Amino acid sequence: MSFEILGNKDTRSGFGEGLSELGKINQDVVALCADLTGSLKMDAFQKEHPERFFQVGIAEANMMGMAAGMTIGGKIPFTGTFANFSTGRVYDQIRQSIAYSQKNVKICASHAGLTLGEDGATHQILEDIGMIRMLPNMTVIVPADFNQTKQATIAIAKHYGPVYLRFGRPVMPIFVKPDAEFIIGKADVLQEGTDVTIIACGHLVWKSIEAAKILSEQGISVELINMHTIKPLDATAILKSVSKTSCVVTAEEHMRNGGLGEAVAQVLGEHLPRPHEFVAVNDTFGESGSPMELMTKYGIDTQNIVAAALKAISRK
Amino acid sequence: MEIVKLEGIASQVRRDIVRMVSDVNSGHPGGSLGCTDFLTFLYFEAMNHSASPFSMDGKNEDLFFLSNGHISPVWYSVLARSGYFPVAELGTFRKLSSRLQGHPSTDKKLPGIRMASGSLGQGLSNALGAAQTKKLNNDPSTIFTLHGDGELQEGQIWEAAMYGAANKVDNIIATIDFNGRQIDGDVENVLSLGNLEAKWEAFGWEVLSMNGHDFKNIREIMTLAKSRLGKGKPIVIIMKTEMGQGVDFMVGSHKWHGIAPNAEQLEDALKQLEETLGDY
């Protein structure tokens, strides 16, 4: 099976377009930004709905607290800043004012992971999925491409409850159809196969598509799952697939600790223990470099997924 | 309401506080007793609010945010005494499965609570958010808050202070419980706040001072504060209080920040506080 490339864009632009569209269809949507309007592509919403756009300055703790307060009275706040400043910097604010208080806040986090690139490790958060999925009441979504990020942005406004939406900076191929329906918590099976299951999220979904192609040229049948929702995790889809293939690779732009791989391992460990290989960053900080160089250096590139799949199959 | 009536309610609230914390041998009586007169005035006179039915969205009513959540006993008592939930429920404070958690929370659906607090410094941001939503909804109601003075050592308070003034959030009246005490001792010695009035003024807030134990002064200053709403500046009241007010052996000492009275001390305290509305 081949995937048609529908274009090349960054996922953050998908967020910006989704937010702009939401602004037109839902009067309760408000947006807050901590001095990164251009980077988050929130300028369209700001221009179209200045009365519903709140520039908070470089003060993320206040932004999270305000977003929580704004829900009282029925608004649906979308906060925008880099993933690092959306999570680690404000963990306690999210924990108390948003997650524990069950507030309908959408935490929209750009420039996640290594592919932020040249800014280096201070900004390349690789722990955010783990931190946020540990919090009760949180939903964690990591869409795969521009179209899916746009669809997810629109979908989370209809879902009541706190959401963490993680996306990124680099231009990547678009393969999700523009009219696809985004269902929170329902995995997308992109390709059916019998030898190995590859479960990926975010930018690693495209890398997994590339890996699946290489593996298929070697006669290996890959079942490929885009796990865009890390929490709640679609355990049914995982068990259904792995019971067929009997081995699994998880691939993510995140630490091995705490991320998608660990979430999948919990499901399999409890219900269906099978060989599992992890493509993820291994307990190290990143560094400056171009996004693609970094993915290669830190072992989360196409070739790493291919090697992990072969190893998983060999362990069956 | 007549001041003597407010004083009577406050006396009962103080009885509730010392009985609640003594019963579970935990909780924070000092700050609770110090803020009793203010919260009594807020809920029984200053605020336009609806106890029943309680609405989380609180549209077209005034809202209160307790930023220093550890003084939950006073808030719980005032909420119960103003009809948000049965007074008898005060007896469940800090006990397993109670809606009256050690620090206020929303997850057990206690009417009157709209935001969890306990980890300090977050309430002013929450309140500013709610204030902005009031404006978006063309709701002319007012947002009230309470913060500890020690709590002002948290940086987020000053992020919020900057935002409130820069964006002319003028539908909020914040109050500082200025008792000069925190867990480790006097605020002045732990980490001095310097010239607090000048700080808030420099941040662009309208600053008022109030004696938190004189209902006449509370009424006068709260009326003045309300008259300054809608004039382009957020309002803060620096409220002078004594930790442990109303119980002679607790008054003015940081030692009663988070310590419960034992049975003998409770008896002594209750002798000093008239039972006006019936104990829970």
Image (cartoon, grey):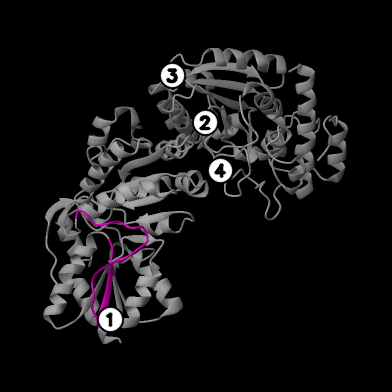
Name the quadrant containing residue B55. top right
The quadrant of the image that shows the N terminus of chain A is bottom left
Q: Residues within 10 Å of mark 4 (few under 14, many from 20)?
A: many
Q: Residue at x 22, y 38 (%)?
A: A38
Amino acid of disc 4: Ala
Which chain is disc 2 placed on?
Answer: B
Question: Marks 4 and 1, Cα distance to the nearest angstrom?
Answer: 46 Å
Q: Which residue is mark 4?
A: B116
Q: Which residue is mark 3?
A: B204
Determine which of the numbered discs, if any, sits on residue B263 in the image.
none
Which chain is disc 4 placed on?
Answer: B
Which SS class for mark 2?
loop
Q: Residue at x 17, y 65 (%)?
A: A296
Region of the chain picked out in magenta, as a range? A178-201
Mark 4, mark 2: which one is toward the viewer? 2
CB atoms of marks 3 and 4 within 8 Å = no
Q: Is residue A192 magenta?
A: yes
Give whichever of discs 2 and 3 has the lower sequence position: 2
Which chain is disc 3 placed on?
Answer: B
Question: Marks 1 and 3, Cα distance to the nearest angstrom?
Answer: 62 Å
Amino acid of disc 2: Lys
Q: Are the residues flagged by discs 1 and 3 from a single subunit?
A: no
Give whichever of discs 3 and 4 has the lower sequence position: 4
Question: Marks 4 and 2, Cα distance to the nearest angstrom?
Answer: 19 Å
Determine whether B16 is above or below A132 in the image: above
